[in-house]
Amino acid sequence: MKLVVSIINSDDSKQVQQHLTKAGFFVTKLPTKGGFLQASNVTFLTGVDDDKVDAVISIISQFSRQRTITVDSPFYTYGDASVPTQPMDIVVGGATVFVLDVEQFHKL
């Protein structure tokens, strides 16, 4: 058995959850926040048999997409002076997926 931990942009989370559930996977949803942008994400925990991992990853991949956004970068501090920096384009979204071995599973 495996535990699939997937971190997904909040904008994509509803579709990912709907399609995982529709495919018969049980999903635990945890609201999370990224460290760099402080953007809202959702972390899904999905316990699956080893042979179902690829199906879960396929659904996540299909319904979570990357996009480019422009963000105001923070002020750069040099000595006592703070200098504003230029806005920058960064890629957000997509998914980060971890697959972990599960030694035991109990549904009580």
Image (cartoon, rainbow, N blue to C red):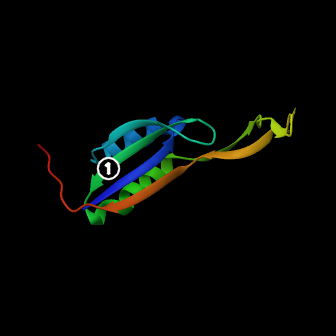
Q: Position of residue 2 (x, y in %)?
A: 29, 60
Residue at 65% x, 44% y is 67
Q: Is residue 77 left or right of residue 56?
A: right
Q: Position of residue 107 (x, y in %)?
A: 14, 46
Question: For mark 1, does the 10 Å Cα neighbourhood hold few (<14), some (14 to 19), or many (20 or more) residues?
Answer: some
Q: Which residue is most to the bottom?
A: 51
Residue 50 lies, with reference to residue 9, above or below; the image says: below
Tell me which corner region of the image, top left, top right, bottom left or bottom right, holds residue 90: top right
Element marked by disc 1: strand
Residue at 32% x, 49% y is 46
Residue at 42% x, 52% y is 59
Q: Viewer-proximal residue, 84 or 31? A: 84
Quadrant including the N terminus: bottom left
Residue at 57% x, 47% y is 65
Tell me which corner region of the image, top left, top right, bottom left or bottom right, holds residue 56: bottom left
Q: Position of residue 75 (x, y in %)?
A: 80, 35
Q: Amino acid at mark 1?
A: Thr
Which residue is identified by label 1? 46
Q: Viewer-proximal residue, 21 or 46? A: 46
Quadrant including the C terminus: top left
Q: How many marks?
A: 1
Q: Is residue 92 left or right of residue 6?
A: right
Tell me which corner region of the image, top left, top right, bottom left or bottom right, holds residue 86: top right
Q: Which residue is most to the left?
A: 108
Q: Position of residue 105 (x, y in %)?
A: 18, 54
